[in-house]
């Protein structure tokens, strides 16, 4: 079967048409190819992560914590001014959209509203 539509999420060629939509059995994504590519590009820009000063953050950036933060399960917290290198942006429903490792504490998630880009 020769189809010209690849899955926009997982880039799989293993897709099939179901009525007006295309379905990817690998990741269960459904999409309508008649939608313009501009609307798909606009959807990808909705996940822009901003720091406390409204600077755009990206993977690999270094940030600084702007206020003292408590850490669950630990007697010590993260002090304001702590530098965090090589952040990774993640999608989250609870607002913790930065994954990082902090020296002395370990791997954790931070909210972008409590950091500023260095």
Image (tube, grey):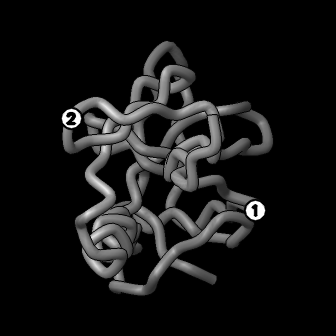
Which percent across, then down, holds residue 95? 29, 44
Instruction: State how many labels appear.
Output: 2
Asked if residue 6 lies left or right of residue 87, the reply is left
Residue under the image location 57 percent in, 55 percent down: 4
* Residue 113, picture quadrant: bottom left
Residue 27 pos. (x, y %) = 50, 26
Q: Are marks 1 and 2 in contact (CB under 8 Å)?
A: no
Please tell me whether residue 57 is drawn above or below residue 70 in the rendered image: below
Q: Residue at x 29, y 66 (%)?
A: 43
Label 1 to label 2: alpha-carbon separation: 48 Å
Residue mark closest to the camera, 1 vs 2? 2
Q: Residues within 10 Å of mark 1 (few under 14, many from 20)?
A: some
Give the numbered dot on residue 73.
Answer: none
* Location of the N terminus (image quadrant): top right
Give the residue drawn at x 41%, y 24%: 28
- The answer to which image quadrant residue 118 occupies is bottom right
Above or below: residue 59 compared with residue 9? below
Q: Which residue is mark 1?
A: 85
SS category of the residue bearing label 1: loop
Q: Where's residue 3, x and y in %?
A: 57, 47
Horizontal side, residue 4 vs residue 62: left or right: left
- Mark 1 or mark 2, which has the lower sequence index? 2
Looking at the picture, does residue 108 appear above or below residue 87?
above
Q: Which residue is mark 2?
A: 19
The residue at 39%/51% (across/down) is: 111
Q: Secondary structure at mark 2?
A: loop
Residue 53 is left or right of residue 39, and the answer is right
């Amino acid at each position: 079967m020769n189809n010209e539509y690849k899955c926009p999420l997982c880039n799989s060629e293993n897709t099939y048409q179901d009525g007006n939509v295309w379905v990817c059995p690998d990741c269960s994504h459904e999409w309508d190819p008649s939608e313009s590519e501009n609307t798909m590009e606009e959807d990808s820009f909705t996940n822009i992560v901003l720091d406390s000063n409204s600077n755009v953050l990206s993977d690999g950036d270094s940030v600084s914590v702007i206020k003292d933060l408590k850490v669950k399960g630990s007697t010590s917290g993260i002090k304001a001014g702590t530098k965090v290198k090589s952040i990774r942006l993640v999608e989250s429903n609870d607002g913790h959209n930065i994954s990082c490792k902090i020296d002395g504490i370990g791997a954790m998630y931070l909210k972008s509203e409590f950091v500023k880009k260095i």
